[in-house]
Image (cartoon, helix red, strand yellow):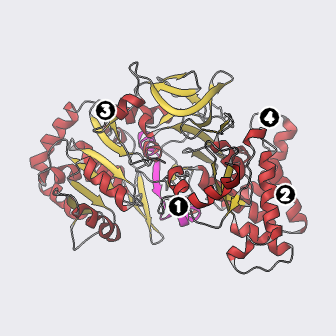
Amino acid sequence: MEILRTFDLLENLKTYPPKDDILARRSRGKWIKYSIDQYYDISHCVAYGLLAMGFKPGTKVITITNNRPEWNFMDMGINLARMIHIPVYSTLSHDDYLHIFTHSDAELIVVGTPTLYKRVAPVAAEIDRDIKFLMMDDSDEVMSLAQLYALGRENRERFAPVVEENKKTISPDECASIVYTSGTTGLPKGVMLSHRNMMFDSHGHAMRQTKNYSHRMVSFLPLCHMYERTMNYEYQELAISTYYAESLATIASDLKDCHADGFCAVPRVLEMMYGKLEEAGKKLSGFKRKIYDAAWNYANTFDNENTGWFYLQKQKLFDKLVYSKWRENLGGHEMLVVSGGSSIQAKIVRCFNAAKLYIFEGYGLTETSPVIAVNSPADRYNVIGTVGKAMDGTELSFAEDGEILTRGPHVMLGYYKNPEATKEMIDADGWLHTGDIGFLQDGKFLKITDRKKEIFKLSSGKYIAPQVLETLLRESPYIENAFVFGSNEKFASAIILPAYAKVREYAESLGEKIEQKEKLLENQKVISLLNAEVAAVNAKVAAHENLKKPHFVFDEWTPENGMLSQTLKPKRRNLLKRYEKVIVETFGNDR
């Protein structure tokens, strides 16, 4: 069947054989599973319940929760009731919540847990508008989801005809969701997405998927992020089971426990997994260490386009001795991993691909529902360093300065209550201006080089692309993260977060016993090591891109403290403010 509205996914699922785990959630070590029939029924009961509460078509409903099947029940129920779903991160600041609650005109907020309720209820109380609350967990404070289901069941006969009529009359072009961008600058903007936007996009990458009804995917990236959300819709279209991880700390055990066939990730998560695999080899000795090192070196330079017999025989050998053990720790299956949100280091893609944990990189924006381009398992191309080909049915073009432009059914309806920003983003000819710079490699594979708004100019007139330099810095095992700055200055510099465990290990290998974290950065040998890592990056780039006077600091950058976006990208405005004194001192005598 043709899937044009979100809830068409439910009807589509009913065409598959019965399945008892279309959605599953791990809680206290046990999987709580929901069948296709349960998903269908509960979603309808949510719709009946919302209507019985008196909410009207067009009502804005906010959800704030970690990933769990109840998110899906709300997502479908809200749209079946002809209402608009506004999924929001559970880690935002007070000011961001206040802005979203106020700007969205939401009448109902659905939270996952009592902890979240205690966090956001006082914010909602500041708004001069009646906002009701629901809680997914059982609650004595507010109405629970179980009570909403019961209310829906009680009112099934009354509201089932309304919902059935909605199914017939809701246009694919009606707004189904408003998604507030996490953004690295300014207040979040509300991206209005239609049913068609999201279903066109999810169907587009579903056609590039090779997994099917018999497979399971683990989900841990927030569902309020469009990347994970439309991957979730893709899984539903193909009846792939979605298993929600218990937490970020349990991802490996969750993958292993449910014998997963893949997952979605942002590069930072894959960088951490890569680091653990690297460390595992260093714990070995003798012949085992030699074998591991050989397999590791092969993986890091793996060429997935090399089909030579001897080359592939080496892969088979290393797979038997090393890579298969990696997979055993993740459930034993070959995997399909999608990476997005920012660029990923090529060596990580090569390493995972060698181990049959195939990484396919894609690219998009919330405003494009979100995928613009992605490498394709079904079409058997995975061009490392690119984000693949543009989605079928879309158009891709480039402005004179290299900015990527896209046009098609995936382009948003516009920004909620912000026509000026919409006009800035989408021109009169319907082209959406992504703000990213790129080009087509070999005339067909999209390669992203940087964010247009983040590129800055030195006082010499030369341009610096900070993302490129930051990615190169993070390739060092001794560097956890970095922020490059220097707009209108004589040179570029960087705030660098050293990888504490690796730096301490290095110091100890030299016989330096340093207990206090901060004291490590007073050790000349450690500073020499870190400077050498920066010098290695400088050797790879143009002279004007060389980083001078880097500042090393053990600090914490997280979405919670505002230093990173929800997709773990540096929030430049906040970082500039936080390190203002350091930045001034960096250029003090050179201005």
Which residue lies under the disc numbered 2?
293
Measured in 3D between alpha carbons, the distance from the residue under mark 4 to the one under mark 2, in whole angstroms, is 21 Å
Looking at the rendering, the stretch of residues picked out in magenta corresponds to 232-255
Measured in 3D between alpha carbons, the distance from the residue under mark 1 to the one under mark 4, in whole angstroms, is 39 Å
* Residue at (40% x, 30% y) in the render: 424
Q: Secondary structure at mark 3?
A: helix
Q: Quadrant of the N terminus?
A: top left
Circle nearer the viewer, 3 or 1: 3
The three-letter amino acid code for the residue at tag 4 is: Asn
2 or 3: tag closer to the N-terminus? 2
**25 up-or-down from 180: above or below:** below
**Would residue 319 be seen by someone viewing this image from the given angle?**
yes
Circle nearer the viewer, 4 or 2: 2
Which residue lies under the disc numbered 1?
558
Measured in 3D between alpha carbons, the distance from the residue under mark 2 to the one under mark 1, in whole angstroms, is 33 Å
The three-letter amino acid code for the residue at tag 1 is: Thr
Residue 331: percent from left, percent from top: 61, 59
3 or 1: tag closer to the N-terminus? 3
The three-letter amino acid code for the residue at tag 2 is: Asp
Which residue lies under the disc numbered 3?
419
* Residue at (47% x, 62% y) in the render: 560
